[in-house]
Image (cartoon, rainbow, N blue to C red):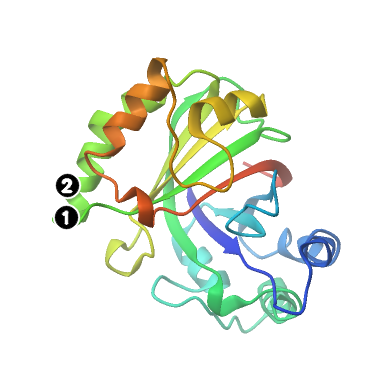
Amino acid sequence: MYKHVALLVRRDDTTHEEFVDHWQNEHTPIAREIEGVTRYQTVLPTDPENAEFDGIAELYFEDLDALHDALGSEGSRDYDPERGKAKEAREDVDNFLDIDRRPRFIGEEILQKDEVDGDTDGLYKHSAFLVRQDGMTHEEFVEYWQDNHTPIAREIEGVVRYATVLPTDPENAEFDGIAELYFEDLDKLYDALGSEGSRDYDPEKGKAKEAREDVNNFLAIDERPRFIGRETVQKDET
C-alpha cells in the first residue's frame, strides 16, 4: 500500500493548540474524504513543546497514480489538485499550515511486525525519518536497513507493531525511508528510544541497546528528524 506522510508545521501566527483544533475539527473531515484514500490517521505529539513538528498526517492509497493526482508527486512540497475533496483540502491547508516548512514523504509500507492486527488507534508511535550516512548510496542504505537492522528493531522490548516505508522515488524523496515503531505504553517507548527533545538516545540493555549501536553503521542520526506521538485512526477501509 502507498502512503503519503506529511510532517506538519503550523503557521507562525498560530499556537499549537489552535493548529490542532483546526486540523482535527475542520481539516480532517475533508481529508478523510479525499478521492482514493483508503486509510487516514493523524498523530499528535505526546510532548508538543519538545516535538520537532506539530503533528503527522498519513494518507494511504492502493494506487500510486491516485495518490499523485490527489497530493502531488515527489520533488515538490506543494500541489494543485483541480477537483473534488483533494482541491478542497489543499485550499484549507493555507488556513493552518506553513506548507513550505512541511516535509513530506511518499512511500510503500512494508509491515515487519504486527501484534495488534492493524489496530493502531490510541497506540504510541515513534516515527524516525531516516537519512543515510555520507558515502553510502540509497541502495546500500536500504539493503543494510532491511537485512541487518530490521531483524534487531522488530525485537525491541515493548514494540507491538513495526513498519518500514521505502520511497517510491528515492532521487526526489526528502528522506531515505521511515521507521515506525508502535508501543502500548509510553514509558516503554521512552526507555527504548528516548524522549522528545533529543534525536539521540542511550538505552542500557537488550535489543534497544543493540539497535542503537547498529544505527551508527548506516544512519546520519543528527540529520534524522523524529516524532513521538499518539495515533488516531480517522478512516480505515483497508
| Depicted 71 relative to depicted 24: above or below | below
Q: Is mark 1 on a helix, strand or loop?
A: loop
Q: Is residue 213 left or right of residue 122?
A: left
Q: Most extreme residue toward the left, as rendered?
A: 135
Dot label at residue 140: 2
Dot label at residue 77: none
How many numbered tags mark residues here?
Answer: 2
Rounded to the nearest whole Å, what is the CA distance between mark 1 and mark 2?
A: 5 Å
Which residue does the numbered mark 1 point to in the structure image?
Answer: 137
Q: Most extreme residue toward the top, as rendered?
A: 206
Q: Residue at x 27, y 31 (%)?
A: 214
Residue 36: image quadrant is: bottom right
Q: What residue type is labelled 1?
A: Thr
Q: What element carries label 2?
A: helix
Work out whether residue 189 or residue 201 is closer to the camera in this orientation and state it: 201
Q: Residue at x 64, y 26 (%)?
A: 187
Q: Badges 1 and 2: C-beta atoms under 8 Å apart?
A: yes
Circle 1 residues within 10 Å: few <14, some 14–19, many ≥20:
few
Q: Quarter of the image containing the C terminus? A: top right
Q: Is residue 147 left or right of residue 1?
A: left
Work out whether residue 161 or residue 193 is closer to the camera in this orientation and state it: 193
Q: What residue type is labelled 2?
A: Glu
